[in-house]
């Protein structure tokens, strides 16, 4: 071994580790403190519940003197227009949704048949009047004849009495017989004249009856002629117009409807709400078709009967399966607000009434 190798230090080697040995670990941190649940959700929930309770109390205080319902709608008069006679439509003088006034002509029918009936009825009246004039003239002639025959009878009776008053032998028996025959003849003529007068009077009564009948027929013919002109019964708007010029219609055929200008509210209140509702109570109305505006109104009347009673199939409660249901009663509320005329309100529109009830 050389001297250099002897003087050089031996290389340091890293200490060997066993395969399964672990490095010494640093000091472990202290365990965290136990987790504390936050109270914030409970505070928020309590605030929400308190807000809801306060809002409910305020709502009750504000509305405890009011009866409201959303089962209400605009109501009004709807006139169904139909023909009263059979005929062909000549003209239709209105259009859909047009506003009409009371008495305005809506539809005209062909009037020629009715006009012919009127002319015939007038002729019958004139004929009956002529027959009555003749009958009255016959009565006058018969009465004059009866007067004349009565005078002849009186003359014959007076002659007979004078002949019998004379002394016997002054008048022959032939003259007495002739006077007696004259009396009988005058009496017969007088009776015949009276019967003729009675017969003429009966004829006059019959002629008067025929005249009355002819006048009645004339009135009926003129009435039928008036039915060829169909007018509006009230002011309103034309709806559901189905008639067209040239249509052949029969009596009661629906032609159109006229919705009247006068409208009101029919509110179906629960029977448990009626205790404080009385006619005359003030009310306010909000209409879905007119948002943002509240109209003034008042209670007009309360229907004597629930809606179920007047339904097409009334409920039959006399069974073992009876279930009590709160009934609704229609309450009529009329508008007391001039602004209502500025809005096109129609039956069926939804509204929300609020009636100030009596405490």
Image (cartoon, helix red, strand yellow):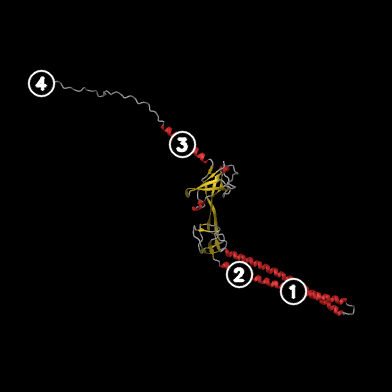
Labelled disc at residue 120:
2
Question: Element under label 3?
Answer: helix
Asked if marks 2 and 1 touch (Cβ < 8 Å), the reply is no
Determine which quarter of the picture holds residue 209. bottom right
Question: Element under label 1?
Answer: helix
Q: Say whether residue 156 is left or right of residue 104.
A: right
Asked if marks 4 and 1 touch (Cβ < 8 Å), the reply is no
Sequence-first disc among 4 and 1: 4
Q: How far separated are the C-alphas under marks 3 and 2? A: 87 Å
Q: How far separated are the C-alphas under marks 4 and 3? A: 98 Å
Sequence-first disc among 4 and 3: 4
Labelled disc at residue 144:
1
Sequence-first disc among 3 and 1: 3
* Residue behind mark 3: 51
Q: Quadrant of the N terminus?
A: top left
Within 10 Å of disc 2 (Cα), the crowding (few <14, some 14-19, many 20+) is: some
In the rendered image, the residue lying farthest to the left is: 2
> Which of the two residues, 147 or 121, is positioned nearer the viewer here?
147
Q: Is residue 220 above or below residue 6?
A: below
Q: How far separated are the C-alphas under marks 3 and 1? A: 112 Å
Sequence-first disc among 3 and 2: 3
Question: In front: mark 2 or mark 1?
Answer: 1
In the rendered image, the residue lying farthest to the front is: 338
> Which of the two residues, 123 or 85, is positioned nearer the viewer here?
123
Q: How far separated are the C-alphas under marks 4 and 1? A: 200 Å
């Amino acid at each position: 071994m050389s001297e250099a190798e002897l003087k050089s230090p031996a290389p340091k080697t890293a200490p060997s580790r066993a395969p399964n040995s672990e490095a010494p670990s640093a000091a472990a941190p202290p365990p965290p403190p136990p987790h504390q649940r936050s109270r914030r959700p409970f505070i928020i929930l309590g605030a929400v519940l308190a807000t809801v309770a306060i809002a409910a109390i305020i709502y009750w205080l504000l509305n405890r003197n009011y009866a409201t319902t959303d089962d209400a709608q605009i109501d009004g008069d709807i006139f169904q227009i139909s023909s009263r006679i059979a005929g062909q439509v000549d003209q239709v003088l209105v259009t859909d949704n047009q506003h009409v006034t009371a008495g305005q002509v809506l539809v005209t029918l062909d009037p020629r048949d009715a006009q012919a009936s009127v002319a015939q009825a007038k002729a019958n009246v004139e004929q009956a009047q002529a027959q009555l004039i003749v009958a009255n003239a016959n009565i006058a002639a018969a009465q004059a004849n009866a007067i004349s025959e009565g005078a002849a009878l009186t003359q014959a009776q007076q002659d007979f009495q004078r002949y019998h008053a004379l002394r016997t032998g002054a008048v022959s028996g032939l003259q007495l017989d002739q006077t007696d025959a004259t009396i009988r003849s005058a009496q017969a003529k007088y009776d015949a004249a009276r019967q003729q007068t009675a017969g003429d009077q009966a004829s006059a009564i019959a002629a008067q009856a025929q005249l009355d009948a002819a006048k009645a027929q004339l009135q009926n013919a003129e009435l039928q002629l008036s039915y060829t002109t169909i007018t509006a019964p009230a002011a309103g708007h034309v709806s559901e117009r189905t008639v067209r010029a040239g249509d052949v219609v029969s009596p009661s055929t629906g032609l159109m409807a006229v919705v009247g200008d006068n409208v009101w509210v029919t509110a179906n209140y629960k029977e448990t709400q009626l205790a404080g509702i009385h006619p005359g109570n003030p009310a306010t109305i909000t209409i879905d078709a007119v948002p943002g505006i509240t109209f003034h109104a008042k209670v007009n009347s309360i229907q004597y009967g629930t809606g179920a009673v007047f339904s097409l199939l009334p409920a039959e409660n006399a069974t073992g399966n009876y279930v009590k249901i709160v009934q609704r009663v229609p309450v009529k509320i009329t508008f007391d607000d001039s602004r209502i005329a500025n809005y096109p309100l129609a039956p069926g529109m939804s509204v929300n009434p609020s009636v100030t009830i009596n405490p």
